[in-house]
Image (cartoon, helix red, strand yellow):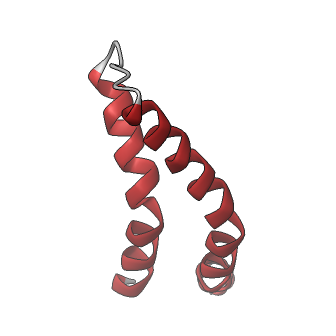
Amino acid sequence: MEALAALKEFMQGLPKELEKKKGDIKKCMLMYDNLDEFHYKFQEDEEYEKMWKVYGAPIEVVQTIDKQ
């Protein structure tokens, strides 16, 4: 019961934490935009995956919370 209550409290706090991270995410995406503008090619495809993970992570968290 306590674990469930703690999990619920944690999940309720996540949207607020995402708001705090929004600035960091925006800066990160701006860096990726700058690299793209200069036609920088990553050596590994994994870097492209990281870019999209940063971009999509907040909505994934919200969707997971909604499902729970």
- Quarter occupied by residue 61: bottom left
- Quarter occupied by residue 24: bottom right
The quarter of the picture where the N terminus appears is bottom right
Residue at 44% across / 80% down in the picture? Answer: 65
Residue at 67% across / 85% down in the picture? Answer: 9
- The percent coordinates of residue 45 (x first, y second) are 27, 24
Residue at 58% across / 79% down in the picture? Answer: 11
- The percent coordinates of residue 38 (x first, y second) are 41, 27
In depth, the one of 7 and 21 nearer the eye is 21
Horizontal side of 24 relative to 50 (left or right) equals right
Horizontal side of 6 relative to 65 (left or right) equals right
Numbered-mark total? 0
Residue 26 lies, with reference to residue 17, above or below; the image says: above
Residue at 42% across / 56% down in the picture? Answer: 55
The quarter of the picture where the C terminus appears is bottom left
In depth, the one of 27 and 50 nearer the eye is 27
- Quarter occupied by residue 15: bottom right
- The percent coordinates of residue 21 (x first, y second) are 67, 63
In depth, the one of 14 and 68 nearer the eye is 14
> Of all residues shown, which one is farthest toward the top?
43
